Amino acid sequence: LYIFIVGLKNKTNKMWSEIFADIKKNNKHELSLHHGELISLLESSDGKVDDELFTLNHLNFIRLTNSHMPLKFSDDKFSELSNLQQLHLYGNQITSLPGK
């Protein structure tokens, strides 16, 4: 199972928590947020990717692309994603990456 969200086709804006709840409920293994929806989420969180993302350690694919905005991550979090195989962050302004 996977989740693939492309852009905003309507005015409904999901929050990070709603997206993460859907991933958990449906046991999804992929997260893809692109352009419009990602922009909306980042604007609602001052450009910071919600830390709850790093509790979804069953994810094996994450794509956060084409926001053309700064992305901010908390320190030392990617190591918690033990099943992550692919991480796509292109089309953004990366301001920091967590690391040890």
Image (spheres, grey):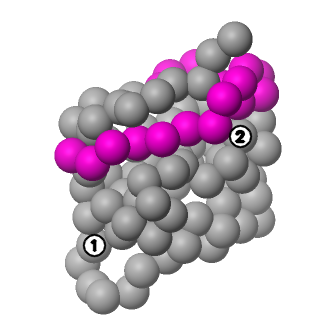
Q: Nearer the viewer, residue 77 or 31?
A: 77
In the rendered view, would you say 20 is above or below 18? above
Compare marks 1 and 2 and give the one earlier in the sequence.
Answer: 1
Q: Which of marks 1 and 2 is in front?
A: 2
Q: How crowded is mark 2: few (under 14 residues within 10 Å), some or many (20 or more)?
A: some
Q: Is residue 69 magenta?
A: yes
Q: Which mark is residue 22?
A: none
Image location (x, y in percent) of residue 64: 40, 43
Residue topped by disc 1: 8
In the image, taking residue 68 as reference, residue 2 lies left or right, namely: right
In the rendered view, would you say 68 is above or below 87? below
Give the residues drawn in magenta, as a range.
68-87
In the image, taking residue 75 as reference, residue 34 lies left or right, namely: left
Q: Give the residue displayed 46% in from the left and 28% down from the top.
A: 96
Q: Residue 54 carries which label?
A: 2
Image location (x, y in percent) of residue 47: 43, 54
Under circle 1, the secondary element is loop
Quarter of the image with the C terminus in it: top right
> Would residue 83 be seen by someone viewing this image from the given angle?
no
Under circle 2, the secondary element is helix
Q: Which of 12 and 28 is in front in this view?
A: 12
